[in-house]
Image: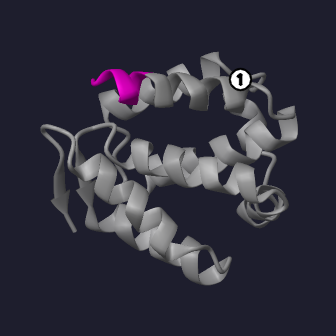
Amino acid sequence: MSLAEFFRTLSNKVRFATWTEEEQIALLKIVDDLYRADGHYAAEELEDFRQKLSISAVYQEDLEHMPVDKAMSILKEDPGKLDLAYTILAEAVYSDGRFVREEREYLDQLITRYQLDGAQLEKRLNRELRKAGNEDLT
């Protein structure tokens, strides 16, 4: 990890930790659903998710009570938070080193259903793809 990536990651963690509990639940709900999209919660994804939980005020059980519609409406309320969500989703996609078709379909559904900025999300995904060892299997 380059120094710039380290500080970007650290900055994202600090920004995320300042969110309300409901905002954290909203983002982690979307990330958890993304990990589950391919039917296989890889060990690397589980570790990445545990790290995200560790800097939040959220328990995994909290995610079960929030519908995706509500999670997305919460994230869309603040453009800055939605922008960070794009970055965290892109990092989550490649947490196991690969971006598979089911994850692509899940993100495409989010983009379409909730009128997300697909170009911004693609920009984040491309940045993650360029990191060593990542594969795009979509």
Q: Which residues are magenta?
A: 1-6
Query: Does residue 138 show up magenta in the picture?
Result: no
65 vs 57: above or below: below
Query: Does residue 5 show up magenta in the picture?
Result: yes
93 vs 63: above or below: below
Q: Quadrant of the N terminus?
A: top left
- Foreground pick, 48 / 75: 75
- Foreground pick, 113 / 18: 18
Mark 1 lies on residue? 56
Q: Is residue 59 visible?
A: no
126 vs 14: above or below: below
- Foreground pick, 91 / 96: 91
Kind of element beneath mark 1: loop
Left of 20 or right of it: where is 137?
left
Q: Quadrant of the C terminus?
A: bottom left
Left of 62 or right of it: where is 97?
left
Residue 21 picture location, percent across and down: 85, 32
At 68% across and 56% down in the image, what residue appears?
Answer: 82
At 31% across and 36% down in the image, what residue appears?
Answer: 42
Amino acid type indicated by mark 1? Ser
Q: Report which quarter residue 45 is drawn in.
A: top left
Q: Report which quarter residue 117 is drawn in.
A: bottom right
- For the stretch drawn in magenta, the main secondary structure is helix
Which residue, as the protein is rendered here, is positioned at the far front? 4
